[in-house]
Amino acid sequence: MTTTTTGPRRTGPGRAARRGRLAALVRGRPDDPRWARPALLAVLTITAALYTIGLSRNGWANDFYAAAVQAGTKSWKAFFFGSFDASNFITVDKTPGSLWVMELAARAFGLNSWSLLLPQAAEGVASAALLYATVRRWHGPAAGLIAAGAAALTPVAALMFRYDNPDALLVLLMTGAAYATARAIESGRTRWLVLTGGLLGFAFLTKMLQGFLVVPAFALAYLVAGPPRLGRRLWQLLAGAAALVAGAGWWVAIVELTPAADRPYIGGSTTNSVLQLALGYNGLGRLDGNETGSVGFGGGAGPRFAGSAGLARLFAGDMGGQVSWLLPAALIALAAMAWVSWRAARTDRVRAAALLWGGWLLVTGGVFSFMAGIIHPYYTVALVPPIGALTGIGAVLLWRERDRSWARLTLAGATLVTAAWGYVLLDRTPGWLPWLRGLVVVTGALAAALVLAAPALARRTAPVPPPGRVRLGALAALAVPLALVSALAGPAAYSLGTAATAHTGALPSAGPAVASFGGPGGGGPGGTGPGGARMAGGGTARGGTGAAGGPPGQSPGGTSGMPPGGATGAQRLPAARGQAGGAGGPRGLGGDTHVAAALTRLLRGGAAGYRAAAATVGSESAAPLQLASGDPVMAIGGFNGTDGAPTLAEFQRLVATGAIHYFLGTNQASFGGGSGGAEQITAWVRAHFTAETVGGVIVYDLTRAR
């Protein structure tokens, strides 16, 4: 009988190295406190949970972008150009950077609600981690944790990092550029500025000129605080600018040099040009209101969705609850940072941080406040990183100087102002968690009182301090958790409510309903949003008549167009009078993705052999149809039916060559249901083809002329 003995288990260098890396991940940097890394992991875990739990309740979220993602999974040409449909008739009215991320996920895992929205949630967690890393480098882990936590709990962040609009990727890229700029200021190395430029170039490919709003702040921060001599700093900034142009320009150049006949029409433009779109409707037109293009308005005549322009816009009804909870604290912190660093050396890190984050906040916030064109409340997600960073840096800076009277007064004042503003925001919805207003005010007042009373507490609990200095009593430390509760309870409640509510359509909004869609001083057409006052939680709440579950394209309730976990919309916009079609047509602007099963069967059965199964006016009308059927649907006139593609002659040629099977009269009501070429095409179809009703929608078979 043979006995085998097993010796002690050997641990090779590879296993030891892996254990060392895991331990380092948990412990963090050697110079950090022991609590820093576990606290960071906790913040990121909570952020991930907030952005992912129940994610599928948003369904396709914004049908417009979801349909473009679907097209990109079926055609690499549509992927590259950002086409709305797989047949490449027209593009979306934005550059396609954010679509690329979602389309790669959908190609890998199939198109569904999770593959569509999970990339944005991941971008949100990555943004919080990058914000922590950037702030922590100069101001310590406590400042980084406050910055990341405050940013993650901002209501508009909880909305947009669960949505398929481009803003999530835009915020990640700008935060990454801020990190690269901070590294450049530390090291003076050109490569970090080149990385900054490359990231901001890709930000342009995500949401055009909005990605460039941070450029002045980042450039000024390096120009003032970069370590090399002035001449070298200027050359380095030129290298960063070259990287920015290259990062944005390669795609623009390819599109502009591609013959118009070989690519889709550039949606939102009036000249079939990306440059015209970037500088016009999505650029300078947003500033002066002359937005002739996608929505067909000019001379500042377009609707406003975020109140009147002015200094108060970010605090008014539409935007206040989205982002402004800590905005007063951030501005106070910026002033304190400027005061502390007034006489400091050129390369002082506090001044550099004030220029970096304060410049981001002031420039972007100023543009949002005064732009005369279309602006939506969710745009304010671009202000989340600088508000979080300034709040975290200012809180730690003032707390470290709390034995000085000016710092105590400033810290106590910021705490009281934040509590008071939180009360005002919560009081705009007095029936929603009414006890929360009292909690915010009481904890804020106690925290401010403890900060102000710190010297007296120190004299009672400690020996006589050295001349000119005081030691604070341990009781004063209670001010920290009390201040955090006061500052974050309101936005955290808004964020939890936002995550627990289904949001769909092109006009999402975080938090409970405020007095009116437009808020003080503004609003949508007629003073309310589409369909009247917006639903609690913003956007359009689903429920009522909807059915949950089912595969993409068909839900158990007999309706189609929803991904797993979605529900059919109960809210509908009224039909546009004087247009072909009528009630019953799917309209994505208000978040309605309802498509009758009979209509879905008709489109699927009639798609074979055609370039497009159907055509209809406007991408927002075409999107639910395309998502439901899985086949290309031509969006006549682009986003809102006002683009110049196709012309009547072009449409007639497509019909004559058998490229389009059906025309659907599902025109939008929000902005008039199309104009120009779209009106001519609609009139021509009505005059030459016979209408029938399928699933509540008027359908014209373009293969059967009268």
Image (cartoon, rainbow, N blue to C red):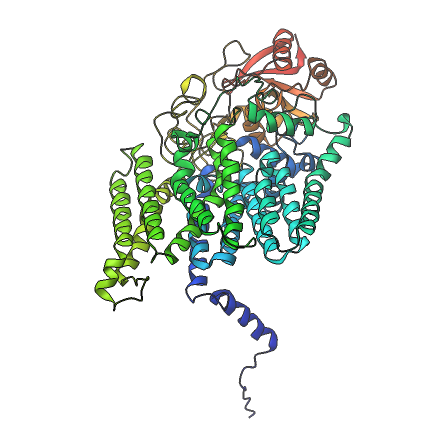
Q: Nearer the viewer, residue 559 or 578?
A: 578
How many tags in the picture?
Answer: 0
Decide if residue 499 is in sight here.
no
546 lies left or right of 633:
left
Q: Nearer the viewer, residue 436 or 56?
A: 436
Residue shown at the point (78%, 28%) measured from the top left: 259
Q: Residue at x 65, y 55 (%)?
A: 228
In the rendered image, the residue lying farthest to the left is: 460
- Report the residue at 32% width, 54% height from top: 481
Where does residue 264 sit, x and y in percent of width and height?
Answer: 70, 28
The residue at the point 61 percent across, 43 percent down is: 101
User: As rendered, which of 205 and 86 lies closer to the eye?
Assistant: 205
Is any atom of residue 569 visible in this view? Answer: yes
Task: Give the image quarter of residue 691.
Answer: top right
In the rendered structure, the answer to whether residue 249 lies left or right of residue 440 reads right
Q: Position of residue 164 (x, y in %)?
A: 53, 38
Q: Residue furthest bottom?
A: 1
Quadrant in which the N terminus is drawn: bottom right
**Vertical placement of 293 versus 112: above or below?**
above
Q: Position of residue 673 (x, y in %)?
A: 54, 16
In the picture, the quarter occupied by the C terminus is top right
Residue 166 falls left or right of residue 155: right
Q: Residue 468 at what x, y percent from top left?
A: 32, 61
Front-most of residues 553 and 520: 520
Vertical side of 290 occupied by 539: above or below: below
